[in-house]
Image (spheres, rainbow, N blue to C red):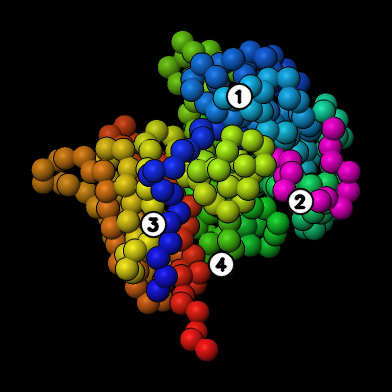
Amino acid sequence: MKDAVYLDKSKRKYKGNLHMHTTWSDGTQEAADAVSAFKAKGYDFISITDHDIFARTAAYDTETFIVLPGMERGGLNLVPDEDPGYHFGVLDDPTIEPMQERFHHLQSFEVPIPWEGQQSPQKLIDDMRAHGNLVVFNHPEWHLTRFEDMVQYDGFFAIEIYNHATEWTASSSYGAAYWDHALQNGKRVFGIAADDSHDHDPSCEIPEYGGGWVSVEAEELSQAGIIAALKKGQFYSSSGPEITDFRVENGFVHVECSPCQYIMFKAFPLRGPFHVEREKGELMTSGSMVIQKGMSYIRVECVDEKGRVAWSNPIFVADLAEEEQQ
Ligand SMILES: [Zn+2]
Ligand SMILES: [Zn+2]
């Protein structure tokens, strides 16, 4: 089995929010104010993903902060304006040459999208990709998405596994079960935590800004740098803790994290170990597991004292196979 480094503690990570709204759709904050708030919170990048209106602007970019072009495309429901429905995160991918023209700043799109049967979500995903975008399957739990949708549709590079806004609006913010369903069925998709913020009231007990983010191990802070790293899964998602290092060495998976009360390895089809210092009640900053024959993927969740989670991306065990000797 080959060694592999997924997150390297010696490398710089960039913190970003990939899902948020402003006054360009139904948010209450102007884009400039939202940018200032995220800068003040120490973020390196955001994507302004308003509903059915594309944001592409370099107006807020500096040496230390960038705004990735993006949108949230929705309005596709079996019954108009009723759940279940589909919202897709759309992120411009500058590393490819698109078949069709890229979306321009404040280009708007019609909603609702007429439901034309089960192929409708796939048609929408394909259309977003043809215009040079990455697609994220947004908030599946909140949207009452059916588990089989994770398998029957293709072309999304990630699933939103934590949506902070729905944590306190509908307590349905966790999409990790959908993620496992996709992974168990052989999909190679990553997990994304994001705010989906619409309002910003820092005095609120659970502020909408800064509740879910990605931490990306990119070569540089640029749109191409961040997108390339996202596509390779060189990031983790979090609602609190940090994952500083994640690697495979000599047939073992090792994770290092900020102090956590649990470290859970989620392996399939054999369960991975659950680490907890139950007797001493101490917090842990590392954990390991042996990779067993027959495992298809392994991911890890590190949970801090407040119950907040850091999610690694999956290790696909087939990628670790040694090439056959000629
Ligand atoms: Zn949405
Ligand atoms: Zn949203």
Residue labelled 1 has its Cβ within 8 Å of some atom of ligand 2: no
Label drawn at residue 238: none
Query: What kind of residue is marked 1?
Result: Glu
| Amino acid type, residue under disc 4 in the picture | Asn
Residue topped by disc 3: 247
**Distance between mark 4 and mark 2 Cα atoms:** 27 Å
The Cα atoms of the two marked residues, 1 and 3, are separated by 30 Å
Q: CA distance from mark 2 to mark 3?
A: 28 Å
- Residue pushed farthest bottom? 326
Whether the magenta-drawn stretch holds residue 232 is answered as no
Asked whether 141 or 25 is in front, the reply is 25
Q: Earlier in the sequence, mark 1 or mark 3?
A: 1
Q: Quadrant of residue 272?
A: bottom left
Q: Nearer the viewer, residue 3 or 82?
A: 3
Can you identify the residue that label 1 sits on? 63
Q: Which mark is residue 185?
A: 4
Counting residues from the start of the chain, the first of labels 3 and 4 encountered is: 4
* Earlier sequence position, callout 4 versus callout 1: 1
Q: Amino acid at mark 2?
A: Ile
N-terminal-most mark, 4 or 2: 2
Q: Magenta segment, which residues?
A: 91-104
The image quarter in which residue 82 lies: top right
